Amino acid sequence: MRWHAGLRQWDMQSKAVWLGLAAAMLAQGGSVRQPVLVELFTSEGCSSCPPADALLERLDREQPVEGAQIIVLSEHVDYWNHLGWADPFSSPAFSARQEAYARRFGLGGPYTPEMIVDGMTEFVGSDARRAEAAIRSASQERKVAIRIEPSATHDALSIGIDALPAGKNQRAAVFVAQAADSASSDVLRGENRGHKLHHISIVKSIQQIGTFGTGAPFHARIPLSGTPPRSRVMVFAQEPGNGRIWGAALYVVPD
């Protein structure tokens, strides 16, 4: 089975998504694409969010930035839920993660839609030009390699991450995000009433599994038991306080 360096082709319904992800991992002009983590904080209760959801899906499927493997996370916040529609994908954990970003960036508070690229740049999530510029810039930053390998029985994943570069007393936390490939909702109330909304890479959970630094690489094993087929498992290394993303990798659970 192929993983991380190239994805299988699945059925016709999901073919466009998998083609986009696979293309991101191919070499261009002799160089391998650099992983860039793109987080979108969104809500089905926010009328400004559907264009941002559509942009995230385009970035995921088309991989339009040369030199970048765009790994996307759709994180649905819950602070819009009291306005008539409870987003079925929302979680207070994602609201808390966004609030930590707001403190780091010195914002007055969280807002939707907000896109954050590699933990370094934030902007309105529907701004395609800003998104591509930020992704292009992030792809040129130094990263550490993250490797994901399935066990022989495909019930666990082994994770390996190179040590952070020497020179400073640097630390990073290792996170595992599990996400559904895609889903749609018929919104019955609230600002998007009457609309069918589609989402990509819908995050179910983000869990920290360890820390590492400049002295030694990181290794861990995580179970896959009970993870539905075609789920996305993303591993990323991030500086404390929702800082810089040092690296990211994607694994798609096979049928």
Image (tube, rainbow, N blue to C red):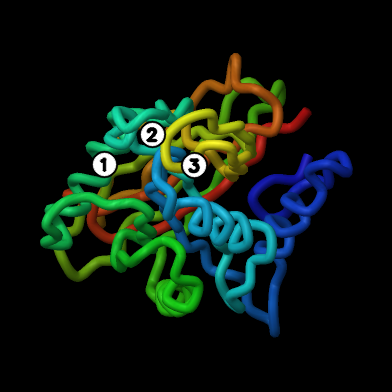
Name above or below for residue 67 compared with residue 74: below
Q: How far across and how far down the image is residue 230, in percent?
A: 69, 33
Q: Residue at x 58, y 37 (%)?
A: 194
In this figure, which residue is indicated by the disc labeled 1?
Answer: 97
Query: Given the image, on which type of amino acid does mark 2 rest?
Result: Ile
Name above or below for residue 117 compared with residue 251: below
Query: Given the image, on which type of amino acid does mark 3 rest?
Result: Asn
Q: Locate residue 175: give its quadrant.
A: top left
Q: How many marks?
A: 3
In this figure, which residue is indicated by the disc labeled 2?
Answer: 206
Q: Residue at x 39, y 75 (%)?
A: 141
State which mark lies toward you, 3 or 2. Answer: 3
Check disc 1 and report its element: helix, strand or loop. helix
In this figure, which residue is indicated by the disc labeled 3?
Answer: 192
Q: Quadrant of the C terminus?
A: top right
Left/right of residue 9 with respect to residue 212 in the rendered view: right
**Disc 1 + disc 3, Cβ < 8 Å:** no
Q: Locate residue 29: give its quadrant.
A: bottom right
CA distance separating discs 2 and 1: 10 Å
**Disc 2 + disc 1, Cβ < 8 Å:** yes
